[in-house]
Amino acid sequence: MKRLLFLLLALSAGCAEIPMLKDFEVNQSHVRLILIDKDRISAFCETIMDRPGDHLDGCARWSADRTSCEIYVTAPESVNDLARMATIGHEVWHCFRGRFHP
Ligand SMILES: [Zn+2]
């Protein structure tokens, strides 16, 4: 049941992932997690991803020197905040599989 909930949350989470290479696959990645205030996350991601008007719960991109994958999300309010927990996992997965959205 938790897997299904996680999948549904991940699919429904607003997300942007550029500039990510499409369809790459790695088994190791240097991930940098940056926490953004919940009132600013969408506007922040819309700006850095150049997707104005989209509602984004998080985003991922390569660092300028391409040595790490940067994840921008809002901190979960508790361990039971499954939506934000799922967003973290969703964005991290972009660091390992690039653009996996259908
Ligand atoms: Zn995504």
Image (cartoon, helix red, strand yellow):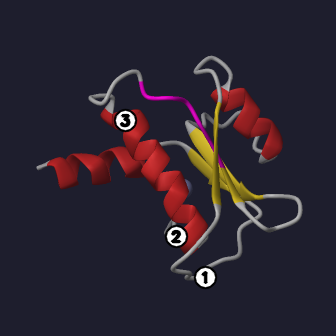
Element class at badge 2: loop
The residue carrying mark 3 is 83
Whether the residue carrying mark 2 lies under 8 Å from ligand 1 is answered with yes
Residue in the image at 81% along x and 37% along y: 47
Badge 3, how many Cα within 10 Å: few under 14, some, many 20+?
A: some
84 sits to left or right of 98: left
Q: Name the outermost residue toward the right.
A: 65
- In the image, ligand 1 is in what quadrant? bottom right
Mark 2: amino acid: Phe
Badge 2, how many Cα within 10 Å: few under 14, some, many 20+?
A: few
Residue in the image at 66% along x and 53% along y: 60
Element class at badge 3: helix
Is residue 80 placed above or below 56 in the rendered structure?
Answer: above
Whether the residue carrying mark 3 lies under 8 Å from ligand 1 is answered with no
The residue carrying mark 1 is 24
The range drawn in magenta is 71-76
Is residue 20 placed above or below 2 in the rendered structure?
Answer: below
Mark 1: amino acid: Phe
Element class at badge 1: loop
